[in-house]
Amino acid sequence: MSDSSKNKKPEPDKEYVAKSRKCLMCRKDFTSAWAGERVCKDCKQTAAWNDSSLAA
Ligand SMILES: [Zn+2]
């Protein structure tokens, strides 16, 4: 009889844990929800960093 059930280690989901980092724009510490978030919410709202069409 062979061991049909191999105990595989459950791979942990590579979820990005929210951690504190510095905003690229205002250099303030903020909590980024994911790896790609490098600008704090404040800067995202005020500065049209991603939507230059908003600027006059
Ligand atoms: Zn900022």
Image (tube, rainbow, N blue to C red):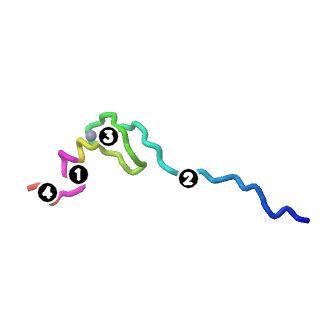
Check residue 27 in the rendering and tell me which mark sits there, or answer none. Answer: none
- Disc with the residue nearer the chain's start (2 vs 3): 2
Mark 2 secondary-structure assignment:
loop
Q: Which amino acid type is shown beneath numbered disc 3?
A: Cys
Mark 4 secondary-structure assignment:
helix
Q: What separation in Å lies between label 1 and label 4 (alpha carbons)?
A: 9 Å
Q: Are marks 2 and 1 in contact (CB under 8 Å)?
A: no
Mark 1 secondary-structure assignment:
loop
Q: Which amino acid type is shown beneath numbered disc 4?
A: Leu
Q: Is residue 40 on the magenta stretch?
A: no
Query: According to the image, label 1 marks what residue?
Result: 49
Question: Residue 36's x, y, as percent?
Answer: 39, 51
The residue carrying pointer 2 sits among few (fewer than 14), some (14 to 19) or many (20 or more) residues within 10 Å by Cα, namely few
- Disc with the residue nearer the chain's start (4 vs 3): 3
Foreground residue among 9 and 5: 5
Q: Residue at x 19, y 47 (%)?
A: 47
Q: Say if disc 1 is inside 8 Å of ligand 1.
A: no
Q: What separation in Å lies between label 3 and label 1 (alpha carbons)?
A: 12 Å
Which quadrant of the view contains residue 56? bottom left
Q: Which amino acid type is shown beneath numbered disc 2?
A: Asp
Question: Residue 4's x, y, as percent?
Answer: 81, 64
Q: What separation in Å lies between label 2 and label 3 (alpha carbons)?
A: 26 Å
Q: Say if disc 3 is inside 8 Å of ligand 1.
A: yes
- The label nearer to you, 2 versus 3, is 2
Quadrant of the displayed image that contains ligand 1: top left
Q: Main secondary structure of the magenta part?
A: loop
Query: According to the image, label 4 marks what residue?
Result: 54
Foreground residue among 24 and 14: 14
Question: 10 left or right of 56?
Answer: right
